[in-house]
Image: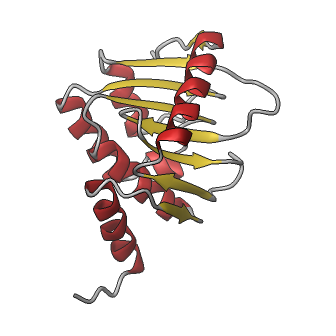
Amino acid sequence: MYFDDPLTLYRLMFKRIVAESLPLRVNNSSPDHAAVLIDELIRSAKDSVVIYCRALTADVWGRPNVVSAILRAMNARVRFRIVTQQRPENTESFRLLDQYERAEFRLYAQEGLDMNFMLVDGKRFRVEPDSNKRHGYAYANNPDEASCRALEFENIWYLASRLKPVA
């Protein structure tokens, strides 16, 4: 099988890693790669998605594939809990989640906590150690780090204030 588009190959590789729950680290270095990983992770969700990020920025969260993945997860009744460091950008993803009864938003701006991460079903995740860059990594199966991310998110969730819905 031959693909002219490296992004298509990247997507197919990560889909297989998720489907087989392989303990492999997949790096990303651009908003294109970040969007593929986020899209595929959300598509794999059965129960929950938790997100801690700067603002659900349009360069990733505004992409049609990501919006489609969110709609699919909403139809499957997946629960979303999202903490942003700034008010989310007014993307289609944010508008959908803001109206979804199984999504909750909170705002938490903490100096020195500049990472972005997403955890799906308590086991698959993507992390950007520096939220000012799009360089990150994802795992479909890394229970130790997933547990750390889950605890980290619960602490942030507890400390975060509720974000008022967009009018």
- The image quadrant of residue 46 is top left
Vertical comparison of 150 with 12: above or below: above
Which one is in front, 69 or 16?
A: 16
The quadrant of the image that shows the C terminus is: top left
Task: Using residue 58 as the reference point, say whether residue 80 is left or right of it.
Answer: left
Which one is in front, 57 or 84?
A: 84
Task: Using residue 22 as the reference point, say whether residue 144 is left or right of it.
Answer: right
Vertical comparison of 72 with 128: above or below: above
Which one is in front, 7 or 127?
A: 127
* Residue displayed at 29% across by 15% down: 101
Percent from the top left, x then y, of residue 44?
A: 28, 45
Vertical comparison of 70 with 20: above or below: above
The quadrant of the image that shows the N terminus is: bottom left
- The image quadrant of residue 75 is top left
Percent from the top left, x then y, of residue 40?
A: 33, 52
Task: Using residue 132 as the reference point, say whether residue 136 is left or right of it.
Answer: left
Percent from the top left, x then y, of residue 69?
A: 29, 45
Percent from the top left, x then y, of residue 29?
A: 59, 65
